[in-house]
Amino acid sequence: MASIDVSFTRFVLNDDQKRLFEKLSLYCDRYAELIPVSFVLGFYVTLVVSRWWGQFENFPWPDRLAALVGGHVRGADDPSRLTRRTLMRYANLSGVLIYRSVSTAVYKRFPTMEHLVQAGLMTSEELRRLEDLPSPHNKFWVPCMWFVSLALRARTEGRINNDVALTAILTELNSLRAKCMKLYGYDWISLPLVYTQVVTVAVYSFFLACLIGRQFLDPAQGYPGHDLDFYLPVFTLLQFFFYVGWLKVAEQLINPFGEDDDDFETNWLVDRNLQVSLLSVDEMYDNLPLVERDMYWNESEPQPPYTTASAEHRKPSFMGSALDISVPKEEMEFQSNLEQIKEHEEANYSTPLLGGLGRLLGVQSPNFPRSSRVSLLRRRPGAPLSRFPLYLHPEAPSTPSQARQPLNHERDPDYAFSNMPLYERPGFYSCPQTPIHCVPPAVPRPRPARRNQNEWDRSCSSLAPPTVGSHICCKHRVNLYFLISSYRTINLLVMLKASYEI
């Protein structure tokens, strides 16, 4: 169709019609990308494939149940053999009934329940009881109930040794029944038809627009992006093949229980499950070969031989990626000073953000000299009672006389809390530890009481020069207050800078 379009536009249309077609092509090429084909088609195919794989994983395989029945229903006499075979026939009958409900191939093989009797999957008495059951629903679960009743009778008769074995058999039966129920649910709740229609319309409308918009236009007209003229849009054709092929895959997998070549072989599953389950509980019951010594009886490391074709693919055992790391010899010695190791750990935990950032950038964190965590939290010996020296000196007082003096609340009530060491403050371990080698966060001071007019006058008069009268000071007291505040702020910044340099 693309070649027909190219021939039509190049050899049939005149110049005016070509110019009009070129404008239409540019318009379609501009707005064709607004159709979200990749998103709609990708989500649709993902949903279809997940349903397809989920149906495959819920096939009612009776192999585990056959192994449990053959191992726990004991007895070589005919009643025991009949019990084992009947149990597995009931399990297979439940699977056939659900396959017959969801698969057209199995339904065509057993169109009526009489065909199941003729095939030997159930008896006439069982069919009569099944039909007499007053239930309008699917009766695939009825053979499972027959299985439970027969297993309980076998336990009562002593053919099943204990209740643990009976519980294991019934648990596996419930697992098989649950898989049948999931297949029934997949067949009952299908994908919405409107979703399939939306995806189909989106794909074909997109390529209908591409059929017009992806044409190579006349380079002489100077259209942007049309410098070359290849006559045929090759990559658009490839995109068409990929998208339409993707859509066809989803249409093929949306119903895997059909009769197509890529659908599930449900009739083969019916034959295989019945044959394997009956062989497992009958012919294979106590059918044990002679127990002999293996050829590696006296070898601690048995090594099966390789053929010439497979010898080149032999590989040594994988021991782990960390075993190839080379550690210098001086770093292999154990550390005897546990206190030093503990201090390094405390340093790493005390600065978690900085330590993690340093490891990310490949930079080692600085080692601060200290003897313990407590030494960092003590004041400098002989330092004045201030807020900043409390955190800057790393050493602890060496003598009791140099220890920190008790706080005088009357002398310095504003710094009563800030002068307390961090490890003595309430809630010190209730929050992440911060690097305490820098300036600590400022503790808000209590707000002073409002001053009356007399206090303002006295403060202004104390700051004024001797030649300036008190009335001048009171007149400009607001300006002086801001000057004093600026002076204190500058001093504080200088102190912060000095503390960081230390």
Image (cartoon, rainbow, N blue to C red):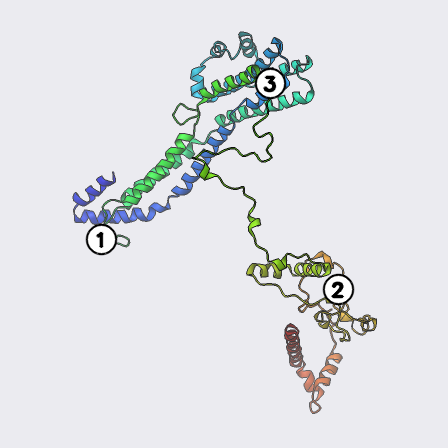
Q: In which quadrant is the N terminus drawn?
A: top left
The answer, for residue 137, to whether it is visible in the render is no
Identify the mark at residue 374; answer none if there is no mark. Answer: 2
Q: How far from the left and from the top, in percent, is residue 210? A: 30, 43
Q: Mark 3 points at which residue?
A: 70
Residue in the picture at 55% in, 15% down: 283
| Image position of 77 (left or right of 41) | right
| Three-letter amino acid code at the position of disc 3 | Gly
| Three-letter amino acid code at the position of disc 1 | Pro
Q: In which quarter of the image is residue 416?
A: bottom right
Identify the mark at residue 219; answer none if there is no mark. Answer: 1
| Image position of 460 (left or right of 199) | right
Which is nearer the eye, 35 or 64? 64
Q: Earlier in the sequence, mark 3 or mark 2?
A: 3
The answer, for residue 451, to whether it is visible in the render is yes
Q: How far from the left and from the top, in percent, is residue 325? A: 56, 53
Secondary structure of residue under mark 1? helix
In this rendering, the label closer to the viewer, 3 or 2: 3
| Three-letter amino acid code at the position of disc 2 | Val
Q: Which of marks 2 and 1 is nearer the N terminus?
A: 1
In the depicted structure, whether residue 488 falls above or below residue 219: below
Label 3, residues with CA under 10 Å away: few <14, some 14-19, many ≥20: many
